Structures are given as structure tokens and as C-alpha cells.
Image: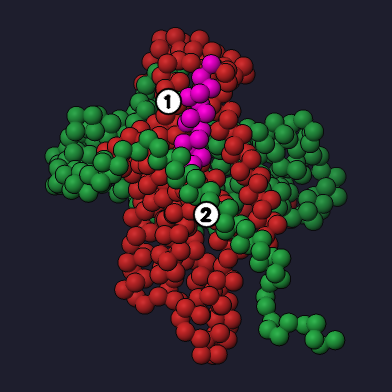
Amino acid sequence: MSSYPTTWKRPPQIFTHRGWRIGLQIGVLVWFVLAIGSIDANWERIIAGAERGMRFVQGFLQPNFTSRWSDIYGGLIESLTMTFTSTIVGIAISIPIGIGAARNLAPAPVYYVCRGIIAVSRALQEVIVAIFFVAMFGFGPFAGFLTLSFATIGFIAKLLAEDIEDIDESQAEAIRATGASWWQLINYAVQPQVMPRLIGLSLYRFDINFRESAVIGIVGAGGIGATLNTAIDRYEYDSAGAILLIIIGIVLVAEYGSSYLRKFLQ
Amino acid sequence: MTGDFPKEWQYRTPKTKLLIWAFWLCMVAGFVYCWQVMNEGTIWFFVQDAPKQAADIGGRMWPPKLSYVPELMRPLWDTLNMATLGTMLGVILAVPVAFLAARNTTPSAAILRPIALFIIVASRSINSLIWALLLVAILGPGILAGIIAIGFRSVGFVGKLLYEAIEETDVTQIEAIRATGASPSQVLNYAIVPQVLPAFWGITVFRWDINIRESAILGLVGAGGLGLKLQASLNVLAWPQVTTILLLILLTVVLSEWVSAKVRTALI
């Protein structure tokens, strides 16, 4: 009677052997010590930088929108136009690729080609792609536009293909039974089922593309990122704070706007 | 009576059709306008020249310089540490923020919740590369800046997904624990935490996978790791080295994706 433990403990789920668990814990501890040891922080530099950090916080609290306004405005226009055009072009390209990458609609060779395109687009980081496009097409928003379109293809086409694979087959079967051609099947059976989600994904991708457009400017692909990079390089933290606040504001508006639109559409 | 109805059935009323057409017109007009504005500064000669440039760079990039690989092992170790330590930092910061932001656990819905939501949005809208840019200027180059940048970016991601998981917890279980006379902290510990724990680990591993990708390029702005080597090789136009680094990054990303998929299926 008294030999029962008073508290219940959940038995371990993944590593059931005790030795494995202890070994894993020791391994993690050793890694942690080694990793912390390899940071090699330069404390003098950090203390010297603390004053700069305070100035950045002050700049963030008292942003200066006015003195660099023309640069900020130019960068913002570049970023927004780049985002808008690249989202539209990216979606226009990714719809056929997405249809081709859906196993229930496309024959095997087309399927593998489209999946390959998606894999390549998803594996390459936007910034790395931007470096190459800048080297090929020269500095400016055109390289950024191409980068964002390329990244959009992987994202939208993959999710669209998965959505098409998940459609209700009975509806497709019903349309097929009327003797519909392949195009009619797409138009009347697939398109109505995936359209709400495609619109939602497009709005979400617009949001992501704007955020990314702020980053790829750092490697020369135009937009607000270039302005931000210049502001930080020149230690103008009040302008940098203003740019960051503008980015946060636009992302907020895009996020709430897109969630409102998605609710309205569904 | 029947004469009032149209002969053919149509899915949409004329008004919605008109609205849809107006929407498409606006999109096309907006696209054309944005295209014009965007390409004001584009030098089309460079664009026409691009295939030649691409062939030129491609020719220089191949074959990859495999003898460069041993030199990349230390940056690779730095990159992996940056991602993992950054994820840990981000998760530690994100847990309290998520509990403050969730509607059912926040201590004050009027003051603390908006602050927590603002932290989440601010961290999410600023990419880790921008955080790194700032932190390198403040802390100096090195992987410490990278770790903090990764951590700050992860707060928003983990915080948002975690607070949504907390808000979706089953109310009946919380009610049952509360009915035993548990204090608020005991309710948190015995009713909410067990429900969100699987989601928590899933989110953490997912973010770790993303952070591996991001930490590989943080070095471009001076935050250490593989990106630093990439930047150095790009600056001296050592294209075979660039290819080697990119292949190594690709391999790491694929491996981390595989690990994270395995861990997530084991956890859930």
C-alpha cells in the first residue's frame, strides 16, 4: 500500500533507454560549452559599442523622418512597386507550374519538371539569388523584381500544387462525367475549389515580398533596403529608426488588410 | 412571372461581374504604372547583356574548388552554432511574450497585451539580416551579433505561433484544473503547458530549420559564419570558391530540413 509513489511521472517517449538519455544530455552540455567558448566576443568593442546602441535606441524613440525624406521616399516607392509587380508576375508564372506539379492533373514527366523548378526556387536564399541577379542585370530594382518573382514561384506553386492535390475528387469526377475537356476540368472543377486559398496565399506572399524587398536592397537590388543600409553605414540612427518604423507600419497595414480581405472573401 | 427571369442561368449577378472587371482593370493599370515607375532607372543595355554575363559567370564558377572545403569547416561550425544558440535565445525570449499576448493568459488585456503584440510584429517585420546589420554596427563583427540577430527575429515567429496555440487550448481542461482549487500558476502549469508543449517543440524545430538557412547568409553583413567567407570570395571574384560555399550551404539546408522533418514526425 505505502510503496506506491505519491507523484506520477510520464515515462519517456522517444529515448526509452536510460543510457541514451544520459549520453544525449552530456552531449548537449559538451556542445553548449564548446559553442559558447567559440563565440570569442570582444568585450572592449562591445563596451565601446554600447554608447552607439543607446544612440540607436534613442533614434528609434525619436525617429527623424525629415532630413532624409527624399531618399526614404524614393526607396519606399521602389520597394512598393517592386513588390507589386513581382508578386503579380510571380503568381502568373506559378499558376501553370503549380498545376503541373499536382500529381492528380499532370502526367509524370511534367510533374517532375515542375517539382524540380519548385525545389530549385525554394532551396536558394533570396539574398543569394539577388547577388547573382545584381551581377547579371546591374544594380537597381529590376534585379530585385526578378529575385522576388523567382522566390514567389517556389512558394505559391508548392502550396497551390498541394492544395490542388487535396481537392474534392468527387467534384472533379462529376465534371469529367459530363465529357469535359482538360481545360474545362481545370476551369469548372479545380479553379472554384482552390481560388479562395490562392487569393489568401497571394496576399500573404505580397506581405512577405515587401519584407524581403527591404533585405535584398542590402546587396544592391534597390528599394528601401539600400536606403537603410546607407543610413546604418553612416551611423544616422535616427533616419534608420524612421525607416524601420515605416517598414513595421507597412507590414502591419498589409497584415491586417490581408487578414480582413481573406475573411471578406471566404 | 417567368418572363422576368433570364433565359440562361448565370453564376454571378451583373453587379458583381462589373466589380470583378473593375478590380482586374485596376490591377492591370496598377501593374503598368508600377512597372513604369520601377524601371525608370533600369539600364536596358545591361538587361540585354544579361545572358552573356550569366554564361560568363557560369563558366567561371565551374568546377567548384573542392580543396577549399577544409577551410570552410570552422565557418560551418560557427553557422550551426549561430542558428542553434540564436534559436535558444529566441525561444527563451518568446515564451513570456507569447503568454502575455495570448488572450486567455494575459495578466492585463489593456496594457501588456498590445505591448506584447507590438514586440511580435516588430520582430517579425524586421528580417534577421537587418537585425544583424544593426547589431554588427553596435557590437562589432562576430558571431555574437549573429546569435542576437537570429534570436530577435525568432521571437516574433515563435511568439506568434505559440500564442495562437495557447489561445486554441481546450477550455474544459483548464476549467477542470481550476475546479480542483488550483492557483493561477498551477492552472498554467497543469492545464495550459501540457496542451501547448507538442506545438512548442514543433515550432522550435521548425524555426531552427529556418534559422540554419538565415545564419548561412548573415555573414554578408559581417556576422560571421559561412556568409563571411562568401562575401570574401565574392569580393575577390573567386567564383569557384563561391560555388563551393553555395553547395555546402545547400547541403546543410537539405540536411537540416531532413532532421527537422524527422524530429517533428517523432514529436507529434
In screen coordinates, is B186 left or right of B201?
Answer: right
Nearest to the observer: residue A160 or residue A185: A185
Q: Which residue is mark 1?
A: A229
Please report the residue visible at 74 percent of the width from the left and 31 percent of the height from the top: B112
Query: In the rendering, at what x and y percent does residue A40 appear?
Result: 36, 21
Residue at horizontal 56 percent and vertical 50 percent from the top:
A204
Our reading of the magenta stretch's main secondary structure is helix
* Residue A174 can be seen in this image: yes
Q: Amino acid at mark 2?
A: Val
Q: Nearer the viewer, residue B207 or B39?
A: B39
Whole-percent x, y for residue B110 in the image = 80, 33
Where is residue A188 drawn, in percent x and y? 56, 77
The answer to which quarter of the image holds residue B98 is top right
Mark 1: amino acid: Asn
Q: In terms of depth relative to the viewer, which is nearer, B86 or A3?
A: B86
Tell me which chain appears red. Answer: A
**Image quadrant assignment for residue B8:** bottom right
Height in image: A81 above or below B268? above
Does the segment drawn in magenta span residue A6?
A: no
Disc 1 crowd, CA 10 A, few/some/many (<14, 14-19, 20+)? many
The shade of chain B is: green
Q: Which region is colored magenta?
A: A67-81
